[in-house]
C-alpha cells in the first residue's frame, strides 16, 4: 500500500493479484508458462551528462506466442517491481497471442531491483527524472530493434514494431513515450493514464464521490467525515482514543489518523467492478445500512479492511506515522520513491477540497497541502523545490500529447483517478480523434481493460479490449 496521500497503487500490482485467481490461457486452453528468468540491460545513471556511470535495469519477457515478424508488446509496471505474473497474465499477453508477438516487461528505474544508485537519499534521487525514465525505455527499444538476439536470446525480427502499453502511471508513460519517440513506438495503449497534474488534487475524491453517489451512500460517507473532523479538531483526547479503538488504529496524531483512514476507505476504489458485483458497494456502502451512525459505519468499514489485510499495530504505525523514516535511505522502498516524484515532479497531492469550492468532502480537512509538503525536505533535503512546479510539468507533458496519433486512451467511468484522465467528469482534456481515440468504459474502475481476463468481466471491459486489439493490429500492419 502506498504511503499516505498517494493512492496510486500500481495498476499492474492489482492485475497480478486478480490474475492469480483468473489465469490467462492460450487459445488451446493451456496456461501460459511463467516468465521467471530475469534479464538485465545496462543504462547510464544520467542520460544527459551529469553521471555517466552505468547500472542494470531488470526485464522479463514471454515469447510463447512469438512468430517472426510479430510485434514487441512492451510494458512497465511503473511504480511496482516486475514479476512473472505481470509478464504473463495481463491483457498484453493475450494481445501477443493475437498478433504473434512477444511481451517484454521492463522495470522502472528506482523500483524493484532496478536501482541506479546505492540508496534512496535526495542526492541519489536527483537522477530520478521523467526525462531519464523515458530515455531508459527508449534506449531499451533501440537495443531490442538493433540487437534483438542479445536482448531476447532468440531470433526476433529487427523490423518488429513496438507497441507500448500500461495502466495508471504506467499508462502515462506509454502515452508520453509514443509522443516523445514516435520513430521507436508504433502505438500506445494508455489505460487510466494520469495525464492531468495539479499541485492540489482535490478533484481526486470527487471521482470517488460519483461512484458513491451511484451506489447511494455518498452523503453518508460525507457525513461520517464531518463527524470525524468534529472529534479530531475538538482536542477531546478521550473521544479521540475511543475513535482509534473503533478504527483498530494505533496511537497516531490526528492528521496521520485522518490520512490513514482515508487510505483504507479508498482502497476499495481500485478493485474491479464485475458482473458478480461492485467491490465498493460490498466493502464501503454496505456498512452504511442505517443500523449505526455514519461515523461508526465508516469505522467498521475501515476496521474490516485492517483485519482482512492482517495489518498489525506496528505495521499501521509504519504506514501512518509521517514522522518516521526521514533518514531511512535503504533501497526497496517504492513508497519513498513515489513520494519523491510527488515532491519533485508534479505534486498531485490528494487533499480535501477548499471550502470555497463548495464540493462535497470525502476526506478530512486535516489532509491538506500543509500536511504533505513539509515531509519533502524532511525526507530529501533542503535542495528540493517546494512547491513542485505542477503547472510546468502539466504544460510540458500534457502539451506533448496534443496532436499525437496512435494512442488509445481508456477511461473507467468509476475510476477514482478519472478527474486526472483524458476524459474527466468535466469533459475531454484531450480531443477524441480517430487517430487517438478515447473510450469510456461503462461502470469500470481503474485500468480494468489491461488486466488479465476473467469470466465475470463486464461487457464494456471486453468491448474496450476488442477496440484496442483492432487498433494495435492497424498500427503494426
Image (spheres, rainbow, N blue to C red):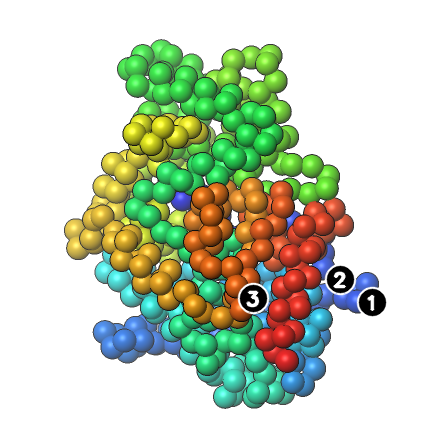
- Can residue 65 be spotted in the picture? yes
In the figure, residue 357 lies in which quadrant? top left
Report which residue position mark 3 lands on. 434
Local crowd size for mark 1, using a 10 Å CA cut-off: few (<14), some (14–19), many (≥20): few
- Rendered residue at 79%/67% (across/down): 27
The mark nearer the N terminus, 1 or 3, is 1
Q: Secondary structure at mark 2?
A: loop
The mark nearer the N terminus, 3 or 2, is 2
CB-based contact (under 8 Å), mark 1 and mark 2: yes
Judge from the rendering whether residue 204 lies leftward or rightward of residue 408; answer left or right.
left
- Can residue 305 be spotted in the picture? no
Report which residue position mark 2 lands on. 25
Observer-nearest of 242 and 218: 218
Q: Position of residue 228 (x, y in %)?
A: 40, 20
Judge from the rendering whether residue 305 lies leftward or rightward of residue 225; answer left or right.
right
Q: Secondary structure at mark 3?
A: loop
Quadrant of the frame with the C terminus: bottom right
CB-based contact (under 8 Å), mark 3 and mark 2: no
Q: Position of residue 233 (x, y in %)?
A: 30, 19
Observer-nearest of 319 and 403: 403
- For discs 3 and 2, the disc positioned in front in the rendered view: 3
Report which residue position mark 1 lands on. 28
Amino acid at each position: 500500500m502506498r504511503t499516505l496521500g498517494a493512492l496510486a497503487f500500481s495498476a499492474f500490482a492489482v492485475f497480478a493479484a486478480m490474475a492469480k485467481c483468473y489465469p490467462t490461457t492460450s487459445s488451446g486452453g493451456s496456461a501460459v508458462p511463467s516468465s521467471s528468468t530475469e534479464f538485465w540491460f545496462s543504462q547510464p545513471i544520467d542520460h544527459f551528462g551529469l553521471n555517466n556511470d552505468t547500472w542494470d535495469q531488470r526485464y522479463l519477457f514471454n515469447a510463447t506466442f512469438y512468430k517472426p515478424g510479430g510485434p514487441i508488446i512492451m510494458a512497465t509496471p511503473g511504480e511496482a517491481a516486475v514479476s512473472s505474473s505481470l509478464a504473463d497474465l495481463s491483457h498484453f499477453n493475450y494481445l501477443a497471442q493475437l498478433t504473434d508477438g512477444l511481451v517484454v516487461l521492463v522495470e522502472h528505474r528506482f523500483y524493484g531491483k532496478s536501482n541506479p544508485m546505492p540508496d534512496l537519499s535526495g542526492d541519489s534521487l536527483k537522477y530520478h527524472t521523467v526525462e531519464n525514465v523515458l530515455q531508459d525505455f527508449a534506449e531499451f527499444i533501440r537495443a531490442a530493434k538493433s540487437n534483438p538476439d542479445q536482448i531476447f536470446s532468440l531470433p526476433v525480427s529487427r523490423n518488429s514494431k513496438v507497441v507500448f502499453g500500461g495502466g495508471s502511471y504506467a499508462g502515462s508513460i506509454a502515452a508520453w513515450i509514443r509522443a516523445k519517440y514516435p520513430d521507436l513506438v508504433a502505438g500506445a495503449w494508455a489505460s487510466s493514464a494520469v495525464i492531468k497534474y495539479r499541485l492540489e488534487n482535490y478533484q481526486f475524491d470527487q471521482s470517488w464521490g460519483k461512484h458513491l453517489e451511484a451506489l447511494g451512500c455518498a452523503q453518508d460517507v460525507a457525513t461520517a467525515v464531518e463527524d470525524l473532523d468534529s472529534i479530531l479538531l475538538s482536542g477531546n483526547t478521550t473521544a479521540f482514543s475511543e475513535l482509534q479503538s473503533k478504527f483498530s488504529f494505533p496511537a497516531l496524531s490526528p492528521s496521520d489518523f485522518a490520512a490513514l483512514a482515508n487510505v483504507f476507505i479508498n482502497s476499495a476504489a481500485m478493485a474491479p467492478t464485475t458482473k458478480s458485483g461492485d467491490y465498493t458497494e460490498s466493502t464501503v456502502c454496505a456498512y452504511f445500512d442505517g443500523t449505526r451512525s455514519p461515523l461508526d459505519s465508516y469505522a467498521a468499514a475501515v476496521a474490516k479492511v485492517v483485519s482482512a489485510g492482517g495489518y498489525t499495530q506496528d505495521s499501521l504505525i509504519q504506514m501512518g506515522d509521517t514522522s518516521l523514516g526521514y533518514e531511512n535511505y535503504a533501497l526497496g522502498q517504492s513508497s519513498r520513491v513515489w513520494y519523491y516524484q510527488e515532491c519533485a515532479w508534479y505534486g498531485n497531492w490528494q487533499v480535501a477540497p477548499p471550502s470555497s469550492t463548495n464540493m462535497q468532502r470525502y476526506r478530512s480537512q486535516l489532509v491538506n497541502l500543509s500536511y504533505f509538503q513539509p515531509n519533502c525536505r524532511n525526507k530529501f533535503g533542503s535542495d528540493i523545490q517546494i512547491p513542485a512546479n505542477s503547472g510546468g510539468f502539466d504544460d510540458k507533458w500534457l502539451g506533448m500529447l496534443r496532436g499525437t496519433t496512435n494512442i488509445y486512451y481508456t477511461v473507467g467511468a468509476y475510476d477514482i483517478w478519472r478527474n486526472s484522465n483524458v476524459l474527466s467528469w468535466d469533459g475531454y482534456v484531450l480531443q477524441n480523434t480517430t487517430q487517438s481515440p478515447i473510450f469510456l468504459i461503462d461502470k469500470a474502475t481503474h485500468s480494468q481493460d489491461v488486466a488479465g481476463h476473467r469470466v465475470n468481466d463486464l461487457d464494456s471491459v471486453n468491448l474496450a479490449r476488442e477496440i484496442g486489439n483492432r487498433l494495435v493490429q492497424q498500427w503494426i500492419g
